[in-house]
Image (cartoon, rainbow, N blue to C red):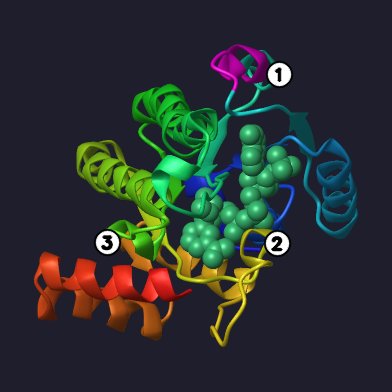
Amino acid sequence: MSTAFLSQYGPWALVTGASSGIGEEFARQLAAKGLNLVLVARRADRMQALAEQLSQQYPIETRVISLDLTDPNFLSTLTPQVEDIEIGLLVNNAGMMLNGPIHKVDLRRHQQLLALNCEAPLMLAHYYGKAMRARKQGGIIFTSSVSAFMSVPYMSHYAASKAYVLSLAESMSYEMRDANVAVQALCPGYTETEMTAGIKGNIKMMTPTEVVKESLDNLGSKFTVINGANNRRQVWMMRKLFSRKRALEMVGKMMKKN
Ligand code: NAP
């Protein structure tokens, strides 16, 4: 258990998308650091099982809140259930991906993506960021993606939503640092989770354990964390070696082939 981490980011962490993948792993690693957990996603059974396991393994308390973050009123369902506790760390992690040419995906699915990937993290960061500023303590992690650094045809809206999250997190980190609130944009590349389960081909993926460890090890020191040397190299090449036009052509060709 890390006392310094616990006193800066405890006593409670709220993790969205905690029912699987990277969010579940955030819950596991934060529990190991001694933080109490509020787990948020739709699948209550998965979160309940995780909460029971973690509270047996570590001396922590847990709360499970099952809700749909695309519901425009989700904040008024969530906040009364946690108003008696202090959220020291917000992990804005829940997200969804859409594949295919933008016009072939139903507009309602695009609107859901916008609500889940952009609007919900904004609403939560606005709400808890205010409280953290007042306390002069806390942290907010936004799960963005390496796709935030480039335009990605056939995954256009997902990449655009992650660019929004990256920009929001980076500028918030500047605004919040005088209040001792650490804000981080976490940018994983391909990671083994339910989201990537259907992806075929010879893609080397990172594990959620590696991704989350890198995030938590760098919270408070780096405002943008790109996971893994391969992903950092890829982002560096896209930003420094190629023009946006060239990068678009290269990524577009690759995505079209896949
Ligand atoms: P995942 O296993 O599919 O997890 C997604 C999480 O979001 C689940 O817990 C899911 O829970 C929750 N969620 C989805 N729709 C929701 C809704 N309407 N309301 C509330 N919760 C909802 O995928 P993951 O890879 O761990 O994704 C976590 C984050 O990492 C996402 O923001 C994703 O964009 C980002 N990311 C992933 C990769 C990758 O390669 N896997 C790469 C870069 C970035 P329920 O279904 O129970 O609601």
Is ligand 1 within 8 Å of the beta carbon of the residue shown at mark 2?
no
Given the image, on which type of amino acid does mark 2 rest?
Ala
Q: Residue at x 32, y 57 (%)?
A: 148
Q: CA distance from mark 1 to mark 2?
A: 24 Å
Could you tell me which secondary element the residue under label 3 belongs to? Answer: helix
Relative to 15, does residue 231 appear above or below in the rendering? below
The residue pinned by badge 2 equals 32
Could you tell me which secondary element the residue under label 2 belongs to? Answer: helix
Q: Nearer the viewer, mark 2 or mark 3?
A: 3
Label 3 Cα neighbours within 10 Å, binned few <14 / some 14-19 / many ≥20: some
Q: Position of residue 94 (x, y in %)?
A: 58, 44
Q: Position of residue 19 (x, y in %)?
A: 74, 48
Magenta span of residues: 71-78
Could you tell me which secondary element the residue under label 1 belongs to? Answer: helix
The residue pinned by badge 1 equals 81
Q: Is residue 149 magenta?
A: no
Q: Residue at x 21, y 37 (%)?
A: 175
